[in-house]
Image (cartoon, rainbow, N blue to C red):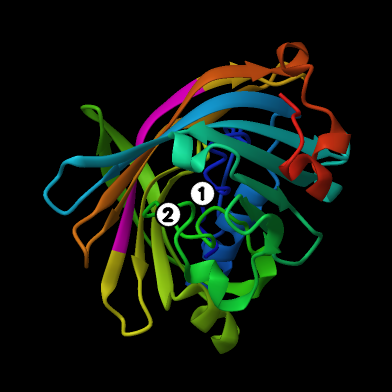
Amino acid sequence: MPFSVTHLRNISIAFIAITSASYSFAETAQEKGYNIMQSMDQLPSIQRSLTENVFKIYDAQGQVAFTKKARSASYVENFDEPDNQLSRSLSYFYAPSDDKGNSALMIEVQDKDDDQWLYLKGLRKPKRVLGSDKSSSFMGSDFSNGDVSKPALDEANYTWLSTEKFTFKGKALAVEKVQASFKDAAKQDDYGYSKTIAWVHVKSGLVFKAETYNLQGQLYKEMLLLSFKAVKNRDGKKVYMATGLQMRNLLTGTKTEMLVGKIQTGAQAKKVKPEIFSLQYLTRKWW
């Protein structure tokens, strides 16, 4: 869906503050919604990063059922061309032992869905994520494969709903409430979503909350921002990286927390090279 994990710039790609944002009174709600999302899509980002990610998967009784750990790398191609940037991400799971060796690759393609691949050691070969696979669980978590990919901006219709106050860690912030839905019914079927509503803090570019509705129109999942960190990119611009996300499945009662730590960017992430974002490195050591 248009408000995906990658839109939150978690793991590897970060939303950054917009220095100014004004919306004409002549705009329709649809135009305003699109302009907000377009602004976020064009935000400066971190060129390369390396992180350690922990997935805490809770059962319906609120107990931790699994804890999964992964190393993740990201790289932005055409970094000096804001209108032509393309992101790459690669994750290697190393815990628990049953998951050790599983990996995921996402390659952003201009004006199309991410080219998304999974390597599950039980299958012994990479599997491309296509069609209804987008609605399947990402590595056994409450995030779906579609949640961690990035559909093209123009594949969805957007509607600005309102300006609201959102309280985060005791501080009230003005946010824009925006609804998104795929233009193509087949896309809705693939992702399993009829619409998503998100609460966007325009000045930081962070999405503090997102609600997802299933094909029957039921509120299905709720994503909350748990924490974030401000870092500088290679141009010295401040970037707000989401370092904690919670995804709750309201129908099953389960939830997953994705926590991002040991963040290395720029020269610190020297192991992150463009050539590692390929199928060969799904099964080859790059870290």
- Residue at horizontal 52 percent and vertical 63 percent from the top: 33
Q: Position of residue 202 (x, y in %)?
A: 49, 42
Magenta segment main secondary structure? strand
Q: Residues within 10 Å of mark 1 (few under 14, many from 20)?
A: many
Q: In the structure shown, which secondary structural element does the residue marked by tag 2 occupy? A: loop
The amino acid at mark 2 is: Phe
Relative side of 13 to 189, left or right = right
- Residue at horizontal 57 percent and vertical 43 percent from the top: 21
Compute the Cα span from label 1 to label 2.
9 Å
214 relative to 266, above or below: below
- Residue at horizontal 62 percent and vertical 32 percent from the top: 72
- The image shows a total of numbered marks equal to 2
Residue 31 versus residue 147: which sits nearer the camera? 147
Magenta stretch?
221-229
Q: Position of residue 88 (x, y in %)?
A: 74, 43
Label annotation for residue 191: none
Label annotation for residue 143: 2
Q: Position of residue 275 (x, y in %)?
A: 88, 36
Label annotation for residue 5: 1
241 relative to 24, above or below: above
Assess whether residue 95 is covered by the magenta stretch: no
Residue 5 appears in the rendering? yes
10 relative to 130, above or below: above
| Quadrant in the picture for residue 283 | top right
Relative side of 130 to 205, left or right = right
The single residue placed furthest to the left in the displayed view is 61
Relative side of 56 to 124, left or right = left
Q: Nearer the viewer, mark 1 or mark 2?
A: 2
Q: Do labels 1 and 2 touch, CB within 8 Å?
A: yes
The amino acid at mark 1 is: Val
Q: Residues within 10 Å of mark 2 (few under 14, many from 20)?
A: many
| Quadrant in the picture for residue 62 | top left
